[in-house]
Amino acid sequence: MKYIVFSLLLCSAQLFAQTSGELKSWLPAVDGWAVSDEVEVFDPVNLFDRINGAAPLFIENNFQEMTSLEYKKGKDYIVIQAYRHATPEDAFGMYASERSSELEPFAIGGEAQGDKSGLFFFAGSMYIKMWSYANEDAGQLLQTIGKGFADRIDPNAAYPSAFQAFPAEGKEPYSEAYITANYLGHQFLKGAYTANYKKDGKPFQLFVINGKSREGVKEILTNYFTFTKQPLDFQEGSLLIEDRYNGDVPAIWKGQYLIGIYSENGDAVEAKDLLQPAADKLQ
């Protein structure tokens, strides 16, 4: 049994630990275009050399390595930046942090967005950014390349499974996100799955934090209730966290999960109809 577990872990690690050579070999062939032999690789130390001010956010999302690749056709070229993160959740989180309402969504990888000159998607532990520098509308070409590339990286790419617990009613489209650290400005709130909602004209955010165990959530809540100066005699079930910076945060503690609602405007939201259905779906 020990060897089987090790084998499964090894296979999982290999699935998401692509080398620059593997990534290059997975780029689909495109008539008239050639994949350049020029390949650049950046790590957390020198990522600043390529993307400068954007690097800290990537590193916060547990960035591991970026491989820069190119397609060329005469003077035209397409640049591909393949960012590898520690986990698929981190890759999704980085993608979601740069999601734009000005771009069109596409069913490529776990999700994609783009226009005639750019395409951005996540798959496995990779966040892929593509730009066309061609004298033509390259939107369809980028989608073709992106689809072929995403299918090689992870043909089953999807949102993190925690989002299956989020109620559909009232949820704002394409608002799902994953916050690796410092959710609501608190160091002890890490790995928060979030989505924006609107109910009775009031905007708010539903969040789920996986504490990995009952004791993990208890530690989170002990830190939170110490911060809010509330009694530490809390129990599993419904809670009200009186956060002086973020307003009241209604929540449910269920096993290894903390499910809560945050209202940036400080609006009181009827929480039970949202929190309980989400808690019921989390095993």
Image: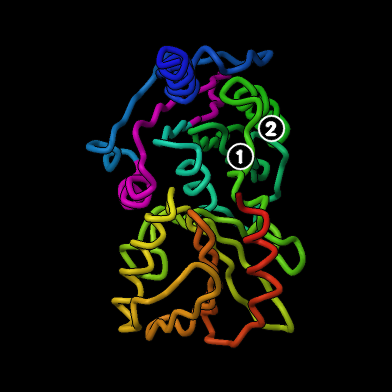
Residue 160: quadrant of the picture: top right
Residue 276 placement (x, y as % from top left) = 66, 67
- The residue that mark 2 highlights is 143
**Membership of 126 in magenta stretch:** no
Q: Nearer the viewer, residue 72 or 250?
A: 250
Disc 1 on helix, strand or loop? Answer: strand
Q: Nearer the viewer, residue 248 or 153?
A: 248
Disc 2 on helix, strand or loop? Answer: helix
Colouring convention used in this rendered image of the protein: rainbow
Q: Which residues are magenta?
A: 51-80
Q: Closer to the N terminus: mark 2 or mark 1? A: 1
Left or right: where 226 falls relative to 84: left
Q: Is residue 63 visible?
A: yes
Q: Point out the residue furthest to the right here.
A: 169
Residue 243 placement (x, y as % from top left) = 40, 82
Left or right: where 80 falls relative to 171: left
- Residue at 71% over, 73% down: 273
Q: Is residue 37 visible?
A: no
Report, in whole angstroms, how far the alpha carbon at label 2 lies from the one at label 1: 7 Å
Residue 222 placement (x, y as % from top left) = 33, 69
**Amino acid under disc 2:** Gln
Task: Bin the neighbour count of mark 1 within 10 Å (Cα to Cα): few under 14, some 14-19, many 20 and up.
Answer: many
In contact (CB < 8 Å): disc 2 and disc 1: yes
**Membership of 54 in magenta stretch:** yes
Q: Nearer the viewer, residue 184 or 210?
A: 210
Q: Is residue 226 above or below residue 105?
A: below
Residue 207: quadrant of the picture: bottom right
- Residue at 68% over, 70% down: 274
**Amino acid under disc 1:** Leu
- The residue that mark 1 highlights is 119
What is the quadrant of the N terminus in the image? top left
